[in-house]
Amino acid sequence: MKPVVLAVPDLVSNSYFPAIAAVELGFFRAEGLDARTELIFPNYRAFEALRDGSMDFVAGPAHAALVACPRWEGLKLLGALAQGTFWLLVMRSDLATTPGDVNLVRGRTIGAAPLVDLTFKQLLRDAGIDLARDNVNVVGVQDMMEPGVSFGVAAARALEARTIDGFWANAMGAENAVRSGVGKIVLDVRRGLGPASAFHYTLSALMTSDLAIARDPDMVAAGLRAVVRTQRALADDPSLATEVGRRLFPAAEAAAIADIIARDVAFYDADVSPAAVTGLNAFAQAAGLLDAPVAYDDLVATQFRENWKMPV
């Protein structure tokens, strides 16, 4: 067995779940890789570790890598863990809410994690909201920087405490807020709630380094195959997620994860399309993370893409 390390910026989450589950359900092991998961937060620090050679893979938001590696230099996008921008806007349940109505943020305080907040701010701009003019305050939440804390879970707690009016975070945080009755989902761009342009701001991605590819391309290909096979296994049987949740998550989140994954599997396609890269480039430029577009072949590890659609 070849030892490999996968970094994730949020463990108690659906966001990067296919990669986490690939470790826990033995799909890496079936490919000859003895994989372990390491939690590294904030998200850009996971990419710093990948850049510096202490990680073999990162499961994270593709745009966050630009903080560690300008123009994604030294890194490659191996495949999508899930298609599209995967965070949701949840607002307090006592507010009058209409699904898809971005105007609800006017005069409100919204929690969002570092770098994740850039996607929310761009969404607001695309929807005609001006943060200053419309008095929208985008903030962090209490305890979000503590080791092992999921931002979405912390945001749901902050919403319940009413220290914020809403949050932009993963579906685990949204599920907690909805199940407890403290929040309602207002925006979910993957499902048509919000500006269409926001779908391709970023994606949940499996990434590796040029160093890892040069050192051991077979290992890289095997890691990608493990994740693709996990996506398919979860699509066939989302209840497999409960097994992973029981090992890694607190009880409430473990009980919820299979339902969340059952909804997410519609987006489980490892293909990285030209449209996804075009949208990622455009968002990164608008957010000030990138000075000019990066060519598809310079960002995506195309030599491995046959694994995206490999036979069952």
Image (spheres, grey):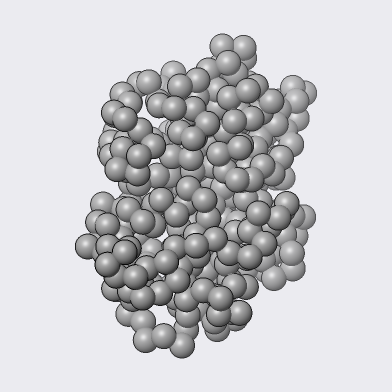
How many numbered discs, if any?
A: 0
Kindly give the residue lying farthest to the front in the view shown.
132
Q: Residue 179 placed where, x, y %?
A: 57, 78
Residue at image point 58% right, 64% down: 141
Q: Could you tell whether 249 is left or right of 75 in the image? A: right
Residue 277 seen in this snapshot: no
Residue 66 seen in this snapshot: yes
Q: Could you tell whether 131 is left or right of 220 in the image? A: left
Residue at image point 57% right, 43% down: 43
Kindly give the residue lying farthest to the top in the view shown.
214
Compared with 186, 288 (above or below) is above
Q: Residue 96 placed where, x, y %?
A: 37, 86
The quarter of the picture where residue 173 lies is: bottom right
The quarter of the picture where residue 14 lies is: bottom right
- Image quadrant holding the N terminus, namely top right
Q: Residue 286 placed where, x, y %?
A: 29, 43
Between 146 and 227, the residue placed more toward the observer is: 146
Compared with 76, 166 (above or below) is below
Between 97 and 31, the residue placed more toward the observer is: 97
The quarter of the picture where residue 53 lies is: top right
Residue at image point 59% right, 72% down: 158
Between 281 and 122, the residue placed more toward the observer is: 122
Q: Residue 196 placed where, x, y %?
A: 25, 56
